[in-house]
Amino acid sequence: MDFLKSAVASISKGPAFPYTFGDRVDIDQSIWTLHNGTRREDSSKCSIFSFDINANKSRQSLAKNALRKFRTLRHPGIIKVLDTVETDHLIYIATERITPLNWSTRRKALSEQSLIWGLHNVAKTLKFINSEASSIHGNVRASSIYTSESGEWKLGGLEILSSMKEDDAVIFSQGSLIPDIGRYTPPEIAKSGWDSVRKNPLYAVDAYDYGILVSEVFNGGFSGSDQIGSTQNIPLQMLTSYKRLTHAAPKMRLSVAHFLEQGSRSGGYFDTALIQLSEGIDNLGLKSETEKDEFLGELETVAETDDFPEEFFRVKVLPELLKSVEFGGGGAKSFGLVMKMATKVSEDEYDSQITPVIIRLFTSPDRALRVCLLDNLPHMIDHLSQKVVSDKIFPQMVTGFGDLAPVVREQTVKAVLVVVPKLSDRVINGELLRHLAKTANDEQPGIRTNTTICLGKMARNLSPNSRAKVLTAAFSRALRDPFLHARNAALLALAATSDIFSEEDCATKMLPTLCPALVDKEKLIRDQANKTLNIYLERVRKYSTTLPDTVLPPPEAASAPNTRISTPQPGVGGQVLGWAISSFTNKLSTATGDIQPNSNGAKPTPLERPSSTPPMNGLQPRPANSSIQSASHVPKVATGLRSAPIVPQVEDEDFGNGWDDIDDDPSAAWAEDLDQTSGSQGHTSNPSTSSVSYDDGGEPDFEGWLNAQAQAKTVPKKPLPKGLAKKTTPATSATRPAVASRSSAPVRPATSTTATRAVAPPSAKEDEDESWGDAWG
């Protein structure tokens, strides 16, 4: 902490350094202090090596040599330097963000494939230093290696890196100043000193140290000289070459360049998918179509495994793939790999790297790319904001609803469910429903089926005001679809959305719509229809238990005097219908006591009966002094087309005189009651005169009811609901001839009635309710 304060204070007094120090990073076997840092200009991450000259003057030459080599020696395998500062008191080296390799190797957190890949990178770097730069690193070990944000191993520890062309190279005079250098010193140097380097091959020191590095990373550390040459945990393919790296004789050692060459042969220890991937990703844009497809296939295989560093795919491979998709013709296959790797990036990286590319790709006319985008939409939707989806993604996506390729239309319908949660209510209930209304009538049965499924799943996202109307129209149309699975999808959707409809809609709309499916030709549909029907019936039955028994006023206020409303008796076999209103008692056994005098005060004789009471068993006793009177007219019964006279049969016995004493016609009284009930202003029966024309056995006069209805036709009536009123009603004529009465009253003329009922036009409200959803029909 004291050093950090002094460093910050020195920065404020010293030259400008456009980086901010962060947390200190623990490293060992180094002359440097490492800090995490950020660049002030753009807040990008970095690492900062610092060296306090005043605190460690004996190793000042090592720090200055490392600074010089970092500035002049550039290679992908060496730590990338961003900026440096050197004063009389301090040295700062700002580099890319790095992490000490020891953090991972000591915990054995890296897989064998990752270790081999890292050793391959170090071998390529040492080959460059020994061969192209004609130099010796002299400090190769795990503490000198760091991992970048991409997971690649980067070589540091350049304190004694020296060119053999320099006579005063640091390695000869300052090599022994490196911390803990004795454990990694080759036998010849331990015996004769660093001057012996001049007498041996240039690669001898680095080959020996590289052999120790191989053992160190596979075993999680280096314990000392007894571990040198040990084959424990070393891959079998690497054993032979590894032993030659650590040979005691410098001239017998295998150079790092030869070790790399042997391992890169077909089937060698460096011939792995991850190594091939890392070498091929940089040149992806230069590959031919065949090479690119082959490379992407290998990349997909590698990406599906968990043995490789996520950082490499996230930082190194992902940007290259995005370039290939957008500019290099990588197409749908490259984008599919991008989506697999995108799950490993942070939210900030996703917004900065991937989201802009996705927005641009949705504007591409490439159908294969559009299908790939729609397929991967579930993976990217959580990273896209609602504004991006509504303003930039959805307007481009809806073009797929009208595409000529069925696969594009189908994938667009499927993708609706993914974007619906991030669309506004106005877009959902407006533009989106219009597009779905078209796909619901698509020529492809699979698209129609998927549209029904889509509507069922997004039902609760629809507006409550139009939800029931939209789904009723859509599902009703789907139930009439000739495609089996479209009908089944409608039934499943209806079952899943049963709670959306009101109980009245369930009873009046849904149940009538479902009933035809009960007799579908396919058993699959019939079975599902029964299940769905039971769901709606259960709702309706449960709701019916909450309804009142009646909404009519009490019987005393609703019924005329001396009338009684009969109640159907349950469980009476054969009784289907009964009279609703009766003016006399059904059960004669309940009639007790004496008959009260009539209105004129005269008691009826035992042979007389009230006009409203039908004869018992059709027979009445006849008084002795009565005579048979013949009817003056023969009654006629009206039929639908013509009427035929009915001629009474004269029997030998004289038993008809019992009907002569009938004063009133019961059928006329029944017709009179109907006239009063319907509110008509028809004729009324004269109580002083009666006309008995035909004995109907006490049955109600249907002709009288027809006459009452004809006379009431001038009274305006409320039109029947739409769907129940008939379009045309044929004219009905009923003619009944006048019948002569026994009394002196004139004969009532026959009445001819022709009633024609016009269909009531639907109201504007009904037109409005039924007009929506025409596109679904």
Image (cartoon, grey):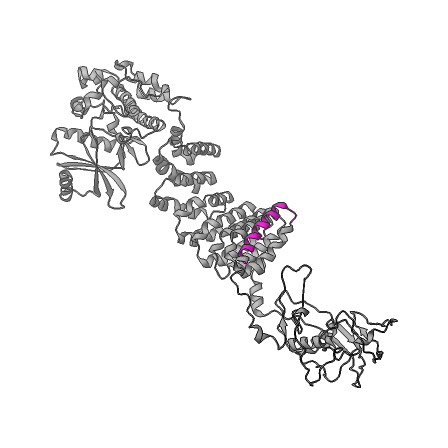
Tell me if 186 is positioned left or right of 258 in this view: left
Q: How many marks?
A: 0
Compared with residue 395, is residue 242 higher up or lower down, i.e. above or below? above
Residues drawn in magenta: 520-540
Q: x, y (%) of residue 777?
A: 60, 57
Quarter of the image for the N terminus: give it: top left
**587, 96: nearer the viewer:** 587
Magenta stretch contains residue 293: no
Tell me if 207 is positioned left or right of 476 in this view: left
Dominant secondary structure, magenta? helix
Tell me if 644 is positioned left or right of 579 in this view: right
Q: x, y (%) of residue 57?
A: 12, 31
Q: x, y (%) of residue 503?
A: 53, 60
**105, 483: nearer the viewer:** 483
Magenta stretch contains residue 524: yes
Location of residue 390 (image quadrant) = bottom left
Location of residue 560 (image quadrant) = bottom right
